[in-house]
Amino acid sequence: MSDSEKQPYTLIPDLRSLVAEATPDSIISRTFYKDDLMRTILFRFDAGQELSEHTSAHTAVLHILSGDARVAVGEDTHELSEGAWLHMQPRLKHSVYAKTPVVMLLMMVDTP
């Protein structure tokens, strides 16, 4: 299909299936969508795994699809579970600790 015939939307019927295979004691990440403005990554954490404190130059939206996580944002810490949604400004310190197996969607948006 040429660019002029490209479909004007992207549909993924089951996000969790993109990281369905669990790997003990690890974190799996899969970038499944990227364009000029946004990158979307799906994570699967085994219980006890952590993304240590870091920042991003992008605006970020984190959505917990399943499981329980402790998320530190700036000076605050939140216990998040399935359905939680978090918007973060660029350069905000944050970390994620999986209390149980977790599937998390991360959307990073370029900001002007």
Image (cartoon, grey):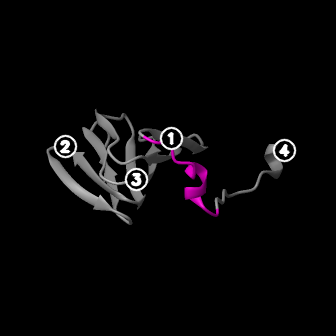
Label 3 vs label 1, nearer the camera: 3
Q: CA distance from mark 4 to mark 2?
A: 44 Å
Question: In the current view of this chain or complex, which residue is farthest to the left?
Answer: 75
Q: Which residues are magenta?
A: 13-24
Which residue corresponds to mark 2? 74
Earlier-in-chain disc, 4 versus 3: 4
Is residue 92 found left or right of 10 in the rendered image? left
Amino acid type, label 4: Ser
At label 4, counting other C-alpha atoms closer than 10 Å, the crowd grade (few under 14, some 14-19, many 20 or more) is few
Amino acid type, label 1: Ser
Q: CA distance from mark 2 to mark 3?
A: 24 Å
Question: In the current view of this chain or complex, which residue is farthest to the front?
Answer: 24
Q: Residue at x 57, y 52 (%)?
A: 20
Q: Are marks 4 and 3 in contact (CB under 8 Å)?
A: no
Q: Position of residue 85 (x, y in %)?
A: 35, 60
Q: CA distance from mark 3 to mark 1?
A: 14 Å
- Is residue 107 in view from this perspective? no
Earlier-in-chain disc, 4 versus 1: 4
Amino acid type, label 3: Pro
Earlier-in-chain disc, 3 versus 1: 1
Is residue 46 found left or right of 40 in the rendered image? left
At label 2, counting other C-alpha atoms closer than 10 Å, the crowd grade (few under 14, some 14-19, many 20 or more) is some
At label 1, counting other C-alpha atoms closer than 10 Å, the crowd grade (few under 14, some 14-19, many 20 or more) is some
SS assignment at label 3: loop
Badge number at residue 2: 4
Which residue corresponds to mark 3? 101
Q: CA distance from mark 4 to mark 1?
A: 29 Å
Q: Position of residue 37 (x, y in %)?
A: 53, 43
Q: Position of residue 55 (x, y in %)?
A: 31, 34
